[in-house]
């Protein structure tokens, strides 16, 4: 997976698929990927009062942020617009009005600089984020990749870069969405994943000697034969639990958070390992915002280490799990021959 014998290419990556405005400059030098800049302007504070992303607001913010983020990314990279060889921009999947902001910005820039554009699939970018800062790239195929974000929960069989087969996905809510919605039920802030993880970790500290997880929640679809997921039942179970308990004191809240997190991890871990066994995968890789979860990373690592067969495990650094444009630039590099003239947003783009 190395960028063999390629020198001095500079790629500008752009991602506006959801609520982060992200631009990165990546350089391939001496066959190595170097992130020259990676700027992410988060809209979290703005969307917090809605408990989730408000698309028309996100679109307006992207429009406002893009020129600022672009200048910052160039300044950090100590580069000039003309140094860029080509532009990689996410064209889906994502929120359509938001995708268009990034695409239109890329188109204007491409026209002004007379540089080509490479469209990037956001899910593939979450997978290839595993190549960032990795030396030497030792990912062996076949790979089972688990992409877990706010919009997606997918298990993908990968036989090479660009060779993907979707083997399972969520039938309703994504894992990140489940974190976000259950956090809202418990009165925690958006994004729910980090909020639940933080309270869950405090829970483990206070109730070490007491019965762990007295609150028990379902693990939907865990033992079904397929590789699909379902998280809306878990959300409903949390809603009923919260109603039944009426007042949720601090200790109960920590236990509920720990159990929500564990229920999500149990299902993701079980199905990923099952897929890896059945497809005789040589590597398991994770990607997407939920892969930033400490407990999930720890439990995957431990489980894979203790398997009877050898399998390599990869997860990007935490900042490359959540949305960023370095992953877009790296993906554009692998598809650099697929330059397009008329790029369109595709909200439901499949891998
Ligand atoms: O990949 P991402 O930044 O955006 C999408 O493509 O959706 O993922 C965002 C999701 C949110 O649902 C957020 O709650 C979740 O990732 N997330 C986490 C953590 N950090 C972000 N979930 C669990 N634990 C975390 N530490
Ligand atoms: Zn994402």
Image (cartoon, rainbow, N blue to C red):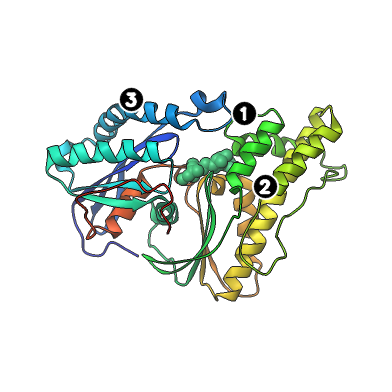
Crowding around mark 2 (Cα neighbors within 10 Å: few <14, some 14 to 19, many 20+) is many
Asked whether 210 or 106 is in front, the reply is 106
The first of marks 1 and 2 along the sequence is: 1
The first of marks 1 and 3 along the sequence is: 3
Residue at 62% in and 28% down:
189
Viewed as shown, does residue 330 lie left or right of 51? Answer: left
Residue at mark 1 to residue at mark 2: CA–CA distance: 19 Å
Which residue lies under the disc numbered 1?
Answer: 189
Crowding around mark 1 (Cα neighbors within 10 Å: few <14, some 14 to 19, many 20+) is many
Q: Are marks 1 and 3 in contact (CB under 8 Å)?
A: no
Which residue lies under the disc numbered 2?
Answer: 232
Position of 105 relative to 2 (above/below): above
Residue at 84% in and 29% down:
246
Position of 312 relative to 69 (above/below): below
Q: Are marks 2 and 3 in contact (CB under 8 Å)?
A: no
Secondary structure beneath disc 2? helix
State which mark lies toward you, 1 or 2: 2
Does the beta carbon of the residue at mark 2 sit less than 8 Å from ligand 1? no
Which residue lies under the disc numbered 3?
Answer: 64
């Amino acid at each position: 997976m190395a960028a063999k014998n390629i020198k001095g290419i500079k790629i500008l990556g752009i991602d506006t698929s959801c609520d982060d405005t992200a631009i990165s400059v990546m350089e391939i030098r001496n066959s190595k990927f170097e992130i020259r800049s990676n700027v992410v302007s988060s809209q979290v504070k703005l969307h917090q009062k809605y408990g989730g992303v408000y698309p028309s607001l996100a679109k307006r913010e992207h429009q406002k942020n893009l020129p600022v983020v672009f200048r910052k990314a160039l300044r950090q990279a100590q580069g000039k617009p003309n140094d860029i060889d080509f532009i990689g921009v996410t064209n889906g999947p994502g929120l359509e009005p938001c995708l268009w902001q990034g695409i239109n910005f890329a188109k204007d820039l491409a026209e002004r600089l007379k540089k080509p554009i490479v469209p990037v699939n956001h899910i593939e970018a979450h997978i290839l984020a595993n190549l960032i800062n990795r030396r030497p790239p030792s990912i062996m195929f076949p790979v089972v990749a688990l992409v877990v974000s706010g919009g997606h929960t997918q298990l993908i069989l990968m036989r090479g870069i660009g060779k993907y087969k979707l083997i399972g996905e969520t039938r309703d809510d994504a894992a990140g969405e489940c974190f976000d919605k259950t956090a809202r039920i418990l009165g925690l802030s958006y994004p729910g994943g980090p909020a639940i993880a933080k309270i869950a970790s405090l829970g483990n500290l206070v109730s070490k000697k007491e019965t762990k997880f007295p609150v028990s929640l379902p693990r939907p679809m865990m033992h079904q034969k397929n590789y699909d997921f379902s998280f809306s039942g878990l959300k409903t179970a949390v809603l009923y639990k919260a109603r039944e308990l009426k007042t949720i004191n601090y200790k109960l809240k920590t236990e509920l958070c720990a159990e929500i997190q564990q229920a999500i991890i149990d299902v993701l871990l079980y199905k990923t390992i099952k897929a890896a066994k059945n497809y005789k995968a040589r590597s398991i890789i994770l990607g997407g915002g939920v892969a930033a979860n400490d407990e999930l990373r720890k439990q995957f690592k431990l489980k894979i280490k203790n398997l009877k067969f050898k399998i390599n495990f990869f997860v990007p650094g935490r900042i490359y799990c959540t949305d960023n444009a370095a992953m877009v630039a790296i993906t554009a590099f692998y598809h650099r021959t697929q330059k397009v003239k008329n790029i369109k947003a595709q909200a439901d783009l499949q891998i």
